[in-house]
Amino acid sequence: MEKWANGLEQVAITVTDENGDFIDLNTHSKRVNLKSMDENLIGKNIMGCHNERSKAIINNMMTNKATNVYTIQKKGQKKLIYQAPWFKEDGSFGGLVEISLVIPFEMPHYNRDQQ
């Protein structure tokens, strides 16, 4: 079966297990996070890739099963960063997933609560 997430050209998906070890990266995540496509992060810990500020945020997300969402501008693109816990079928904490996607600088917002 083809891995559908590899076909997302502007969406980077990175997944860790409950210990913070990388277990999956789609192709776009590898392009934006690795120095070389030959490099392999699988089995390595997420903490080795981050500064102290980021490590504190990651620790909070893992301890409290919290979500962290923000936007950045990098290399002329605006991106939405969505970091959240994922859970196994039995309900136990599985780890963290980060979804990073390119978004327009200006984009419409629709309030579906209003008629």
Image (spheres, rainbow, N blue to C red):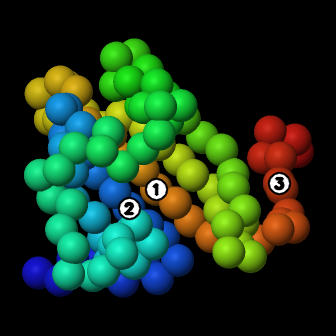
Residues packed near mark 1 inside 10 Å, few (<14), some (14 to 19) or many (20 plus):
some
Q: Which is nearer the eye, 39 or 61?
A: 39
Disc 3 and disc 2 in contact, CB within 8 angstroms: no
Name the residue type under label 1: Ile
Which mark is nearer the camera, 3 or 1? Answer: 1
* Residue 62 falls in image quadrant: top left
**Residue bearing mark 2:** 13
Name the residue type under label 2: Ile
Relative to 65, residue 86 above or below = below
Q: Report, in whole angstroms, how far the alpha carbon at label 1 lies from the one at label 2.
A: 5 Å
The percent position of residue 2, horizontal first and vertical second, equals 17, 83
Is 32 positioned to the left or the right of 53 in the image? left
Among numbered discs 3 and 2, the one appearing first in the sequence:
2
Q: Report, in whole angstroms, how far the alpha carbon at label 3 lies from the one at label 1.
A: 22 Å
**Which residue is at 35% across, 71% downward?**
34
Query: What is the secondary structure assignment of the residue under circle 2?
Result: strand
**Which residue is at 34% across, 57% downward?**
14
* Residue 7 falls in image quadrant: bottom left
Disc 3 and disc 1 in contact, CB within 8 angstroms: no
Name the residue type under label 3: Tyr
**Residue bearing mark 3:** 110
Specify the label residue 27 is tagged with: none
Residues packed near mark 3 inside 10 Å, few (<14), some (14 to 19) or many (20 plus):
few
* Residue 94 falls in image quadrant: top left
Disc 1 and disc 2 in contact, CB within 8 angstroms: yes
Query: What is the secondary structure assignment of the residue under circle 1?
Result: strand
Query: What is the secondary structure assignment of the residue under circle 3?
Result: loop
**Residue bearing mark 1:** 99
